[in-house]
Amino acid sequence: MKVLIADDELRLRKVVALHLKKSGFEVIEAGNGQQAVEIAVEVNPDVIVLDVMMPEKTGLEACAELKATEQCKNTPIILLTAMAESEDLKKGEEAGADAYLTKPFSPKELIDIIKSKVQ
């Protein structure tokens, strides 16, 4: 199963990627929202994990754009963010996110959400 992770924080992205790889996932990485959109449309991953606050294109913008594409409209998208207010969750839903995970989070929690979204 291919998982695209987009986060501008390299260290966090590498830690998440490592945990996902240990759990048997193939991981593709992007450093910002624009890269995430380009890679997702080209590669068509099984799940997309987006940080909300990224340069060039936010995770919310990337999510909405991907949900509007033929290739990714049915791809589960999980938003990762430090913003946990109800208004933030609402914005994630409006963008089309399938799940919303707030930082700090456990890698196991993310893996469980990924597995639940692709069954």
Image (cartoon, helix red, strand yellow):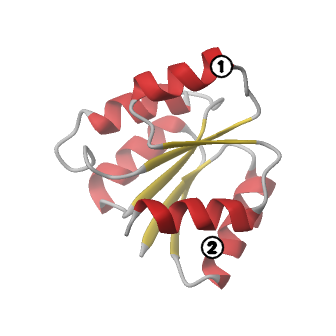
Q: Is residue 27 left or right of residue 105?
A: left
Residue 18 appears in the figure:
yes
Residue 99: percent from left, percent from top:
52, 44
Q: Amino acid at mark 2?
A: Leu
Q: Quadrant of residue 17?
A: bottom right
At mark 2, the secondary structure is helix
- Disc 2 target residue: 20
Q: Quadrant of residue 38?
A: top left
Q: Who's the residue at 39% across and 53% down the image? A: 39
- Disc 1 target residue: 86
Residue 57 appears in the figure:
no
Q: Amino acid at mark 1?
A: Ser
Which sits in the foreground, 95 or 115? Answer: 115
Q: Quadrant of the N terminus?
A: bottom left
Of mark 2 and mark 1, the one earlier in the sequence is 2
Q: Is residue 62 left or right of residue 100?
A: left
Q: Who's the residue at 75% across and 46% down the image? A: 9
Crowding at dot 1, Cα within 10 Å, few <14 / some 14-19 / many 20+, comes out as few
Residue 28: percent from left, percent from top:
50, 65
Q: Quadrant of the C terminus?
A: bottom left
Frontmost of labels 2 and 1 is 1
Q: Who's the residue at 44% across and 43% down the image? A: 98
Vertical position of residue 52 compared to residue 112: above or below: above
Q: Who's the residue at 71% across and 74% down the image? A: 18
**Contact between labelled residues 1 and 2, with CB atoms less than 8 Å apart:** no
At mark 1, the secondary structure is helix
Crowding at dot 2, Cα within 10 Å, few <14 / some 14-19 / many 20+, comes out as many
Q: CA distance from mark 2 to mark 1?
A: 28 Å
Residue 83: percent from left, percent from top:
73, 27
Of all residues shown, which one is farthest toward the left?
A: 70
